[in-house]
Amino acid sequence: MARTETGLAADGYTFGELMVAAAARAIADGELVFVGMRLPMLAFLVARRTHAPSATGLFENGVLRETPSTELLYTMGDPANLRGATQCGSMLEVMGLLQQGRVDVGFLGAAEVDRFGNLNTTCGYRNKEMQRLPGSGGACDIACLARRTVVLLAHDRARLCDRVGHITSPGFGSGEGWRHAQGLPVASGPSAVITTLGVLRFGHDGEAYLASVHPGISVEEVLANTGWTLRVADELMETPPPSDEELQVMRELDPNHFWTR
Amino acid sequence: MTAESKLLTMRDAIARHVPSGCMVLLGAQLEQMIPFAAGHELIRQSRRDLTLVGPISDILFDQLIGAGCVSRVMAAWVGNVSAGVGYCFRRAVERSIPPRLEVVDYSNFTMALALHAGALGVPFLPTYTTLGSDLLKKNGNLREFYSPVSEEKLVAVRALRPDVAILHVQRADAQGNAHIWGSLGVAVDGARAARKVIVVAEEIVEPSVIASDPNRTLIPGFLVAAVVHEPGGAHPSPVQGYHNRDHAFFAEYHEQTRRLDDFEDWLARWVVQIADRSDYWKRLGPGRVENLAVKEHAFSAPADFGY
């Protein structure tokens, strides 16, 4: 049985909250962060309020923020995300920073991710019927150009598949050397995939491996819910649970668990 | 001598400037200031074979597709930002209801570059984005080429010149000189790339108000064909300083358009049976309108243009 983002983990926090904490820790202090919607938005706010007080957030609509917004956001264009912003520029300006290699980390969601970290948000097949999905948005740009990308999604066999049917946002393509051959920037590519069961990272060959499992989750459960034979790190870790401080910030910003059910 | 006013009603602006078959830029400011009132007028005037251009449009593209106005979408993302997928878009692509929808997938950056190229008057602009992606393989307006000045592959993003850009703004004068603040997205390039612009404004102000803060004039009036005074014309999307986002409306749209029949009921209730925007606001009801009002104003510090 695949767990979803709506499940309650042990010790009174949800899997959504665990994912947000793991994502927040992917941001180092002082970094320039391309912030996505939903869980990554919360992750950025948590990072800012805890270990990364001088991280700067960029949004695709042109907004640059050095202080977290004071209320829960449904979209990056919500008035609360613009009030108190340091800059409201254009999309081209923030995308230019990304292309220059100045953006340290970008967050992405996905319908499907494969063993080489390629993402599909364009079209999938369920029960052999084509399903049209919304498309790239800025995901392809972030995946191509950010120095690191971090992907968040619910863990099940259909979504973690051997190879995606459509590469909306390139990861390591078919493995080692692929990004270079495509002409993508040297310092770029997937860094982690944070799921409801664990965290995947990537070897030098571009293939994903299981780096940590969430508390209470077995390696067997992760492998059974992954659509390819997932490698496991020699020194497999347990994902550290969210700290009280991190949970406090999340619940202050999202008291009704709109994003972290 | 005073120049002739460009003020028109929404009905007249759409009738005069947005014919069937044309390419329309909508949703340039992403989740803010989406010109829903203009889109609904396109539906009421039964436009057909439109090409929609925009990075995203939240649910406006979905509505126009469901109403049968569209034969082609050139966008980075089509759906419902806070609720998920767009069911009309899915029905059109998956089941050809309504028929003949061509989708040209962009990323946000390539859409911004296409409009920037249009605004600069050049045929393309180079970028690294989309290298290795299937967007590059499938979108004919993205072409790989070898850089003439550096030893590397790049993507040429073909310029887009929409026939019309419809932009919702906070305030404009009767000539279309417009102040926009907050979420800009691709509005500035979009206005310049387009062959003509329709400005939809929350407020019509004197030219002296525009000239008091010229850095905020992001659309010069000479690009503008028509100015429509339509307060609330962006609902349910927000307009910074004027009204907030109606999150519930997006959630309701998601629930009420899952099935084709339900979408048709939704369309009748919110578009077809509505005469104009004041009628639409009546349907929303005073409680809802009041709820969306700005709760706490936050004015910027004035900039001194004195000398």
Image: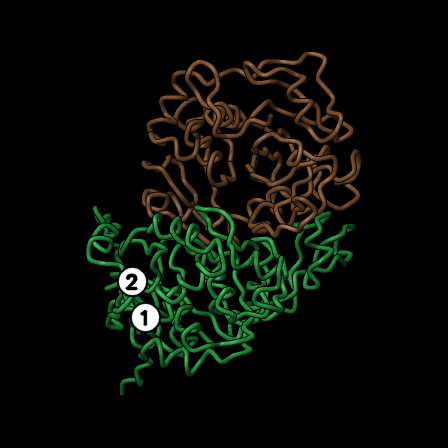
Chain colours: A brown, B green
Whether residue B211 can be seen here: no
Q: Residue at x 41, y 81 (%)?
A: B15
> How far across and down, in percent of the image, does residue A174 sit?
78, 38
Residue B202: give x, y in percent of width and height.
28, 65
Near mark 1 (Cα within 10 A), the count class, few <14, some 14-19 or many ≥20, is some
Question: Which chain is disc 2 placed on?
Answer: B
Q: Which mark is residue B232?
A: 2
Q: Which amino acid does the dot numbered 1 rest on?
A: Ile
Residue B3 in which image quadrant: bottom left
Which three-letter amino acid code belongs to the residue tagged 2?
Gly
Both labels 1 and 2 in a single chain: yes
In x, y percent, where is residue B199?
Answer: 37, 71
Q: Of residues B295 and B120, which is closer to you in this image?
A: B295
Q: On the picture, is B60 further left or further right than A1?
A: left
The residue lying toward the viewer, choosing from B121 and B266, is: B266
CA–CA distance between discs 1 and 2?
A: 15 Å
Give percent across and percent down for residue A7: 48, 25
Q: Secondary structure at mark 1?
A: loop
Which element carries disc 2, helix, strand or loop? loop
- Which mark is first along the chain, 2 or 1? 2
Q: Quadrant of the N terminus of chain A?
A: top right
Q: Which residue is mark 1?
A: B274
Query: Residue at coordinates 50% horizontally, 30% vertically from top-left?
Result: A5
